[in-house]
Image (cartoon, helix red, strand yellow):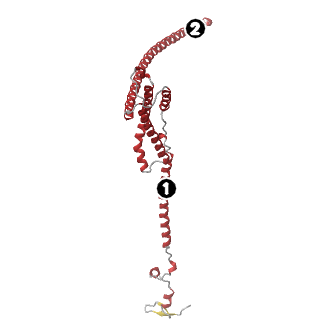
Amino acid sequence: MSTTEEATVNPDGTTSFASEEGGGAGADDVPPSGDEADFDTESGDVPDDAVKGTDPAIFLFLGFLLIATIWFFFYYKKRKDQADSEAFFSNMDGEKFNLKLPAAVEEYYEVKAKCEEAGWEPGQAVAKDAASANGPHRMLAQALMKRCIQDIPLVQHIQKESPGMNKLYSHSMCSVKQWKAYQAAEAMVSAEVDEVRAEADEIEPGWSQVIWRQAMQYHQMLKQRQDMEQKAMAAQAAKKQVENDKVAIEKKKVDDKKAKEEAAEKAAKELMEAEEKEKGGGAGLKKGFLSGSSKKK
């Protein structure tokens, strides 16, 4: 929409124009400045749907999911460790308690049967004559002592393992199979100890009180003898090894000396052959040179 302007002549001769409606209409058509627009925005007149906030339920869900993941991880790890532990103990089949009685047990009963056939009876008094030295009583006593001595390692093994197995069982740290194997071995050894004592009293009343102590002493004596024999054998083997080493050193010296002599002879022979070749080559060269000179003449 156009406006009517009025011309005014100023005293200095210049001309200026003024609108009839004044500056109001023009001022309304001017857009607001940047500061004014920012002020209006900051004043809180912006609609509510212009700003979108995050729903707190999402944070709650994410937090719950994180906690559940951590809990499941530790729960799974605990169950896995427990399963591995149970598998470990279940695989322990108790091989070290798979014990067997020595062969001397059966040998004793064989000797006993022969002695009974020869007229021996349990509790029979020992004869004082010389014939009793090789009689049934002595033979049976020797067989029982041999049986008792061979039982000593079994008794020592059970005595050594018993405290540890009882402690493991009290803390539920051994498998059922291993515990049963230990119980069976312990029962077998205990029955063997009682049976040996009963047989000892049949051979000689009261012998059951000292037979195991005597067997332990004999066992230690035999073990010491075996250790001494093993040490003697080891010393003999070491001595023989030293002698063999000396022989080998002497042989090596002889072989080295012989090798040096052979090498020297070979070198001398090669040198002589080389000198002979040089002499033969020089003579041939000289003869050829003289022959060539005579032809030129």
The residue closer to the viewer here, 183 or 12, is 183
Instruction: Tell me which amino acid carries mark 1.
Output: Arg
Mark 1 lies on a secondary structure that is helix
| In the image: residue 17, left or right of residue 221 | right
Residue 55 lies, with reference to residue 153, above or below; the image says below
The reply to whether the C-beta atoms of the residues labelled 2 and 1 are less than 8 Å apart is no
Looking at the image, how many numbered discs can be counted on the residues?
Answer: 2
Residue 284 is marked as 2
Q: How far is the residue under mark 2 from the one under mark 1?
A: 101 Å
**Residue annotated with mark 1:** 79
x%, y% of residue 67? 47, 64
x%, y% of residue 64? 48, 67
Q: Residue furthest right?
A: 295
The residue closer to the viewer here, 108 or 49, is 108
Mark 2 lies on a secondary structure that is helix
Residue 239, image quadrant: top left
